[in-house]
């Protein structure tokens, strides 16, 4: 089976733009074909004070199951220096990769929830998604991604940062 997926990427530690670029290259190598890459936005840290984040999103087609996809993304995070702790609080990270939406699929598993349960609260997720999939209908809310952005009450400033210069694509 083939899945069409929206993945959110973020980095606020190290060379942020390079971390995102490397993650995208590894995702393309290990998970499947990338159909679209959003612009990058700079946003304040969410839930704690630290360096600002760079955030973007990609649309991917993959034959991996949702849990296989999640495990592959966790492995990429590890390769790029992310150290997860037992306590999953908000902290600085070299890379953060989240499966946000899978077309026509809802996942309610202890290790993975799709649609991402907090995506509606975060402009730093919704703005990049709107760049590449504005008309994608949220599988449980039955509202487009662009409408979710319009309704989002997050007041954090989102600054356009630029495009990702991907090599070998």
Image: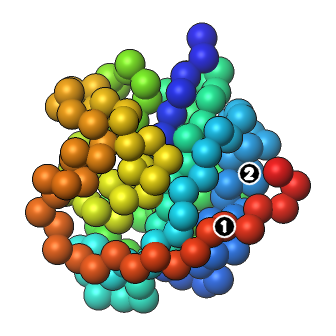
Which residue is drawn at the image coordinates 79% and 43% (left, top)? 29
- Of helix, strand and loop, which one carries label 1? loop
Q: How is the image coloured?
A: rainbow
Q: Quadrant of residue 110?
A: top left
Q: Which residue is mark 2?
A: 26
Q: Quadrant of residue 20?
A: bottom right
Q: Earlier in the sequence, mark 1 or mark 2?
A: 2
Which residue sits furthest right? 168
Percent coordinates x, y for residue 160 in the rendering? 46, 76
- Of helix, strand and loop, which one carries label 2? helix
Which residue is drawn at the image coordinates 31% and 43% (left, top)? 145
Alpha carbon distance from label 1 to label 2:
14 Å
Which residue is drawn at the image coordinates 32% and 23% (left, top)? 106
Q: Is the N terminus in the top left, top right, bottom left or bottom right quadrant?
A: top right
Q: Is residue 16 above or below residue 10?
A: below
Q: Which mark is residue 121?
A: none
Q: Label 2: few (<14), some or many (≥20) within 10 Å?
A: some
Percent coordinates x, y for residue 112 in the rendering? 37, 36
Q: Nearer the viewer, mark 1 or mark 2?
A: 1
Is residue 133 visible in the rendered structure shown here?
yes
Instruction: Report the side of 151 relative to 79 (left or right).
Output: left
Percent coordinates x, y for residue 117 in the rendering? 24, 43
Percent coordinates x, y for residue 105 in the rendering? 38, 20
Q: Label 1: few (<14), some or many (≥20) within 10 Å?
A: some
Q: How many labels, in total?
A: 2
In the foreground, 36 or 46: 36
Is residue 118 visible in the rendered structure shown here?
no
Instruction: Report the side of 48 relative to 1 (left or right).
Output: left
Q: Is residue 124 above or below residue 118?
A: below
Instruction: Report the side of 138 relative to 16 (left or right).
Output: left
Q: Which residue is mark 1?
A: 164
């Amino acid at each position: 089976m083939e899945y069409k997926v929206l993945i959110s990427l973020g980095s606020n530690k190290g060379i942020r733009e390079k971390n995102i670029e490397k993650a995208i290259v590894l995702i393309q190598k290990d998970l499947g074909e990338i159909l679209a890459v959003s612009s990058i936005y700079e946003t304040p840290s969410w839930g704690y004070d630290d360096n600002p984040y760079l955030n973007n999103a990609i649309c991917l087609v993959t034959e991996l199951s949702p849990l296989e996809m999640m495990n592959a993304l966790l492995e990429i995070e590890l390769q790029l220096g992310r150290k997860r702790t037992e306590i999953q609080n908000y902290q600085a990270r070299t890379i953060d990769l989240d499966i946000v939406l899978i077309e026509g699929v809802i996942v309610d598993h202890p290790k993975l929830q799709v649609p991402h349960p907090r995506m509606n609260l975060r402009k730093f997720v919704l703005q990049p998604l709107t760049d590449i999939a504005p008309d994608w209908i949220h599988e449980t809310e039955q509202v487009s991604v662009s409408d979710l952005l319009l309704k989002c009450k997050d007041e954090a400033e989102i600054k356009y940062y630029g495009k990702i210069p991907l090599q070998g694509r």
